[in-house]
Image: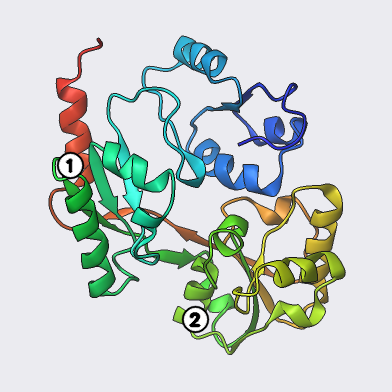
Amino acid sequence: MPYGDLERQAVQRFATRADLLAADCTVEEREEYEPHLALGTVVYAGVDYERILAEAQRQADIILWDGGNNDFSFIRPDLHLVLVDPLRPGNETSHYPGEAVLRMADVVVVSKVDSASDADIQAVSENARRLNPAAPVVRGALPVTLDDPEAVRGKRVLVVEDGPTITHGGMAYGAGFVAASAVQAAEIVDPRTSAPDAIAAIYAQYPHIGPVLPAMGYYPDQLAALQQAINAADVDVVVAATPCDLGGLIEIHRPLVRARYEFVEAGEPALGALVDQFLESFSPG
């Protein structure tokens, strides 16, 4: 998902944070790549997928295609996992290519079952089974944790959320708001009151956004505006739920606590068991 000079970014390889810096990655790109790098996984990106695949195959035994924005794989997968979101019930059939990839799936994963309602979990599960009766449907939770909960409890908090989730993703808030609320922050301060014009324009474009700040940084001036909005907020602490290291990108004048989330299996069949079963039976074509 590169942004900018696509000829220069036709094939990209990231193994360290220094690689991200050298490539002038935007905040959204960092949100996609940094969690993989933190696990020691090499990331390939770009727009020339034939060349990307050729480069990746020279290094890797297993290639994981991460289809951002509900995209289908441009490479025919041997195992196709598709996630449906019960916090957005109905989106699995109302969006393209989301419905297309659901119909193509080998395994359907219903995520966030720890935060969605039972009715919405059931609704997306039934839709998945109706559109793709051959695919097993597995469930998983996405618990959110704070690096330092006591630094947030009872404090006035500014929440910075993953940008795409809150803007074109359509959510009013995300993991940071959930985490700060769970540890009983005294107040979650609405950043609109101190937002500079470049950030105020985002709220005007996406009026559904709640009392949180989307992590915007598609160009240097916008990243500077994000820094200004954070530092102008009258708060005790900043909770950052963006998957990238925001404190490593901009100077933040308040204590910064990161919110993190990780997939946890919930019930049977278990996703890990299905993946193990596939790997044990796989033979290259």
Identify the image quadrant of residue 66.
top left
Asked whether the beta carbons under mark 1 and mark 2 sit within 8 Å of each other, the answer is no
Q: Residue at x 37, y 17 (%)?
A: 61
Mark 1 vs 2, N-terminal side: 1
Provide the secondary structure element on which disc 1 rests. loop
Which x, y percent locates residue 113?
A: 29, 65
Alpha carbon of mark 1 to alpha carbon of mark 2: how far? 36 Å
Q: Residue at x 20, y 13 (%)?
A: 283
Q: Nearer the viewer, mark 1 or mark 2?
A: 1
Amino acid type assigned to the residue bearing label 1 in the image: Ala
Q: Which mark is residue 185?
A: none
Report the side of 108 relative to 169 (left or right).
Answer: left
Report the side of 30 relative to 165 (left or right).
Answer: right
Q: Residue at x 43, y 52 (%)?
A: 95
> Which quadrant of the figure contains the C terminus?
top left
Which x, y percent locates residue 216?
A: 71, 57
Question: Within 10 Å of the Cα at label 1, are there few (<14), some (14-19), or many (20+) other Cα atoms?
Answer: some
Identify the image quadrant of residue 8.
top right
Amino acid type assigned to the residue bearing label 2 in the image: Ser
Q: Return the residue nearer the eye: 157 or 31.
A: 31
**Can I make out residue 253 in this image?**
no
Q: Residue at x 48, y 9 (%)?
A: 58
Mark 2 — residue? 181
Report the side of 156 relative to 272 (left or right).
Answer: right
Mark 1 — residue? 135
Which x, y percent locates residue 91?
A: 39, 59
